[in-house]
Amino acid sequence: MDVDDNVTGEENIIHAVTDHIHDSKRQKQHHPERVFLVCYHLPVLISRPNNNEGWSACWSESLIAKTEQSSVTKTHDTYWIGTVSVVPPIQSENEKQAVRNVLEPMNCIPLFLHDEIEDAHYLGMCKQVLWPAFHNIDLLEMASSGWGQRECYDNGGSGSVSTGNDLNANFFFNTHDAPTHASSVSSSFSPTSESLPVSPTTNTTKTTQSDWDQSRLDVWWSAYTAVNKIFADAIASMMRPHDTIWVHDYHLSLLPKLLDTAARQQYVDGTASSSTTTHHNHRRNYRRTIKMVYFLHIPFPTSQVFRELEHGEAILEGMLNADIVGFHAFDHARHFLNASKRILGLTYESLVGGLIGVRYKGRKVIVSMSNVSIEPDIVDAALILPSVSQEATFLKQKHGERSIIAGVDICQRLSGISLKLLSYERFLTDYPDWQPKVVMLLKCLIPGSRRTDEADALREVRFLVRRIQDTFGTSVIDYQELMGSSLPIDQRLAIWISSDVMMMTPIRQGLNLLPLEYVFCKKEPNYPGVTIASEFSAVCSVLNGALRINPFDVQITATAIEKALSMKVEEKEARRARDINFVASCPSGLWTKNVLRDLNDATFGSYADSSTDGEQESIRRKHAAKKMEAVESPKAILARENESALSKLDVDKITAAYLSCKSRVIICDFNGTLVTKEPPGKYLKREILGTAGNKPPTAVVSALNKLCADPQNTVFVVSGDSQKNLEDAVGNISGLGLAASNGACFASPFVGIQNSQRIWKSFDLGVDWNAVREVGDGRVFLNIFL
């Protein structure tokens, strides 16, 4: 899921959490290395002054909070950079300075954006373009297949009105008035008849109004680049050599390239006082002194979808300027590699350390896959809160002896809530004995960041909830709508403790930590639960004990519900045992440490100064360098062996042999020999061949003319190119023979008028391999010319 919509925290950017500063006045311990954690939303909660009290700030709960047990601040000076959300928005310079002052002890550096730029960047480019595209929603599908459509009805001259109640009036709000956490919920909804869509009258004409407007992309993209530039300028003013900058998520995909440009400019400015020659040498010998990580917390789309983005190439280049590009799932990394290959023509290779390296502008960019779990210490501390046990008891009493199927979902179509309800409806129909024994507890969260999508999804969900209640009774489903993108941790844990099954059915989803939190809450020996996870979610590849389902297959999903509810305790415990060790032992601090270790390994020898290495550091450097070596394929091994076995060309011996012969056969390769080969061409799909349209340099053409002018020479150029490409390149050289398609067809040498058409011939060898052997015998071929 999007880090802003992940229901495990207010602004759930999954990154390293550091030691919580209980006393902001305590003396800080400084470290030689600095890490800047850059995220669009700072992981903090800001409160306005109340009465005579001043501004207050605290870390968001869950992954964003600092913990004493897992901290990058023990080895690095750590800073957070991002924007802040305050209701109502901050306007005056005095308020901005007050926020800076309250965040300074937390090492948080707030950035303030103009409202228009912020809306166009976040609600426009990020949420209307990048969010659906990165979740594999085709642009054509967005424009014409309902992802951005609203249904309207023409009442015969009375104007068009939206169906049902005015959903915007119900729950949509101005961006700056939107609560960002469920703890600030001011209202909730139930599927009463008043809140459900009202069917249009029979004399109305149904039309559709698309929310997709291509003309707005220019404005949104300008705002997107502007916000990335604001972040880059702020960081560039603070960064110094050997800093580590960790950029999080799709809101800031251009930032690594902008920071690389800024670091290069700082280097150039620092050498500007040198002499002209020295200055140019410095520019030529520039090596970046900052290290960068870019981590994407949502899926990366297939190359077919990504290439539809108008600015996809710029986004790819921005990401590739980092030293490490990280993902939570292998599929996401695989799609990124394919996009880099097909759009930019880059190549990649497997490395000894288990990572993947992409060749980009002379550097090796590491692509890594890593998962992060919950913060077990925070969850353990929250589990003993009185509010958790009280809410869990209330839910159990409310639903009596019924088994509880729990779900907490963001209200959007990608969450698959409608598919979950359809499967539950089928389950109640196919297994009527369960109707008085089960209840679905469903929390539908409305963040307000994708308003049209949320309205359409909400309309579908309300309709299905009402249909299920009308058919099977109101007791089979406990449904509630809440404003915001997350539930407070005590409410979540109460739901997990009281439930028997946790069900997530997203159509597309990044790493969602709620299923991991559910598994951890059911760690007690007598309370195992069952997780039903969509195969389209990243968490499905993390939880080995979950029941894996395809949410589009309603019948199979209904069967999985019945299996989960009927599962024996022994099987539940066995499934829990597969996951509990990972869930309880991979907090964000360990994940951060692993990513930074990979970063140090990837950048050893590139940025570090080896002159000060001790013995242990030297050993580690050699180990890191070994990890970054490419894993040799059998083909590469053979090529290396052949290279070592073959001797270099002796020009003197070749010249003597040439002069002593009466007849000579000279065969020249074309691609990569007579003309420069273009490796990207065969990946970009913009041209069929890597040398299409290329012609040899003038010096090469002159040499061929001289060789062909000697009557003792028979000269052929052999290529894998087509006849047309080869003839266009060297076909006008008199006396030159051509062989195209790697020798499958050829044109004999001729002496004639330039640009005259050649006569091409091809071999017809059939399937007689004896004939192939005879032709392949060099002695038979050379006898023709002797």
Image (tube, helix red, strand yellow):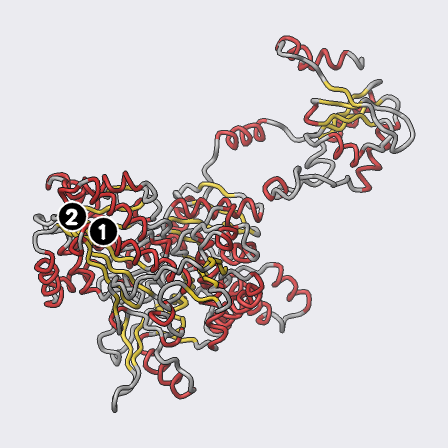
Q: With respect to residue 758, does 438 lie above or below? A: below
The residue to which callout 2 is attached is: 529
CA separation in Å, label 2 and label 1: 14 Å
The residue drawn where x is 42% and y is 87% is 92
* Whether residue 515 can be seen here: yes
The residue drawn where x is 80% and y is 13% is 786
Q: Nearer the viewer, residue 650 or 443?
A: 443
- Horizontally, residue 602 falls left or right of residue 672, namely left
Instruction: Give how far across and how far down residue 754 sits, in percent.
Output: 89, 33
Residue 198 quadrant: bottom left
Instruction: Give how far across and how far down residue 293 sits, in percent.
Output: 43, 58
- Horizontally, residue 118 falls left or right of residue 484, namely right
The amino acid type, in three-letter code, at marker 1 is: Val
**Mark 2 residue element:** loop
* Whether residue 15 can be seen here: no
- Horizontally, residue 109 falls left or right of residue 388, namely right
Instruction: State the mark number for residue 583.
Output: 1
Q: With respect to residue 87, does 215 lie above or below? A: above
Q: Residues within 10 Å of mark 2 (few under 14, many from 20)?
A: many
In this view, which residue lies farthest toward the bottom? 52
The amino acid type, in three-letter code, at marker 2 is: Gly
Instruction: Give how far across and how far down residue 109 sits, in percent.
Output: 39, 75
- Horizontally, residue 694 falls left or right of residue 307, namely right
**Mark 1 residue element:** helix
Instruction: State the mark number for residue 635.
Output: none
Q: Earlier in the sequence, mark 2 or mark 1?
A: 2
